[in-house]
Amino acid sequence: MIVGIDPPDDAAVWKIDDSRSIVVTTDFFTPVVDEPYDYGAIAAANSLSDIYAMGANPFLALNIAAFPPQLPAEFLGEIIRGAAEKAKEAGVVVAGGHTIQDKEPKFGLVVIGMIDTKNLLTKAAVRPEDLLILTKPLGIGVTTTANKAEKAKIEDIQEAKLWMQTLNKLPSQIAVQLGLKAATDITGFSLLGHAYEMASTSNVEIVFTSKNIPFLSGARQYGEKWYFAGGAADNQLFYKKYVDFSREIDEVMEMLLFDPQTSGGLLIACPPLKIQEFETTANRLRMPYWIIGQAFNGQGLKII
Ligand code: CO
Ligand code: CO
């Protein structure tokens, strides 16, 4: 094992020969949307994300499902179909899996990927001066929570679903192609939780500029009505001590930065010398991205 739990990273990495490694991860969760097909596709994109966060190519997956016996069988079929089609888009074969009975549905994938070991993207490789790039807007947690309360606008939940189903494949491939070294994906621990893991394992300070951070259309509005999931308060409780918020950052903005994401984007570190090449490549491939911060000598996080 060359990367794993110490320091923690997005997936386990197992060296198989002088040049290549296998990357393995799993993730599963309860439904985030009402439609079973979309739930399956989102769960698959989310499970694949940790492989992309390492810079690897996923190729094989297994379903993990828990399902209440009273729910119609078509539901499970639709979940599995959504996941299989998303896996196919990623070039991944789903070779079976396992289902058990449980009160609340749960679904996700075990995913195996392959990488040229020298191309690994880790959390611990951010260097001072690196720019921090985010590839999906935040606010997925607060928008899906508002949706569960039946208070979200249909176009807002559609927007969130589109982003959640977007694979992190392209930003991962661009990062590897440009020889970048550090990335992670933004999921349950929020932008600040995951960024703190990068800052602490890389021994740098990361400074985010709040006006450059992208949010879903309804995020601010749902935040003002406090549709935050319990996870946002947990993240705040755990990570706030590592974050220096400038005085202009209001309570809602702070919570939005602690909002847990489902299938969020990649956070990629890019040296200033390579940023123009990154932007040119991303624009040519029509890949959305936002430059939201920079690393410096120091420690912890700062929001200005
Ligand atoms: Co991850
Ligand atoms: Co994960």
Image (spheres, rainbow, N blue to C red):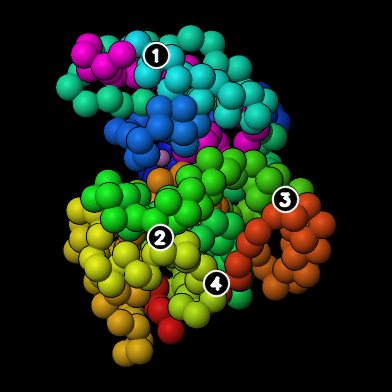
Give amino acid for label 2.
Gly
Disc 3 and disc 4: Cα gap in Å? 18 Å
State which region is magenta: 44-72
Residue located 72% across and 50% down the image: 174
Eye-nearest disc, 1 or 2: 1
Could you tell whether 149 is left or right of 99 in the image?
Answer: left
- Label 4: which secondary element: strand
Which of marks 2 and 4 precedes in the sequence? Answer: 2
- Label 1: which secondary element: helix
Disc 1 and disc 2: Cα gap in Å? 31 Å
Disc 4 and disc 1: Cα gap in Å? 42 Å
Question: Ligand 2 is located in which of the four quadrants?
Answer: top left
Residue 227 lies, in percent from the top left, at 25, 60
Q: Badge 1 is on which residue?
A: 74
Could you tell whether 91 is left or right of 241 in the image?
Answer: right
Residue 149 shown in magenta: no
Eye-nearest disc, 2 or 3: 2
Residue 150 lies, in percent from the top left, at 27, 50
Q: Badge 2 is on which residue?
A: 139
Give amino acid for label 4.
Ile
Q: Residues within 10 Å of mark 2 (few under 14, many from 20)?
A: many
Residue closest to the eye, 220 or 59: 220
Q: Badge 4 is on which residue?
A: 292
Residue closest to the eye, 261 or 222: 222
Disc 3 and disc 1: Cα gap in Å? 38 Å
Which of marks 1 and 4 precedes in the sequence? Answer: 1
Q: Badge 3 is on which residue?
A: 174
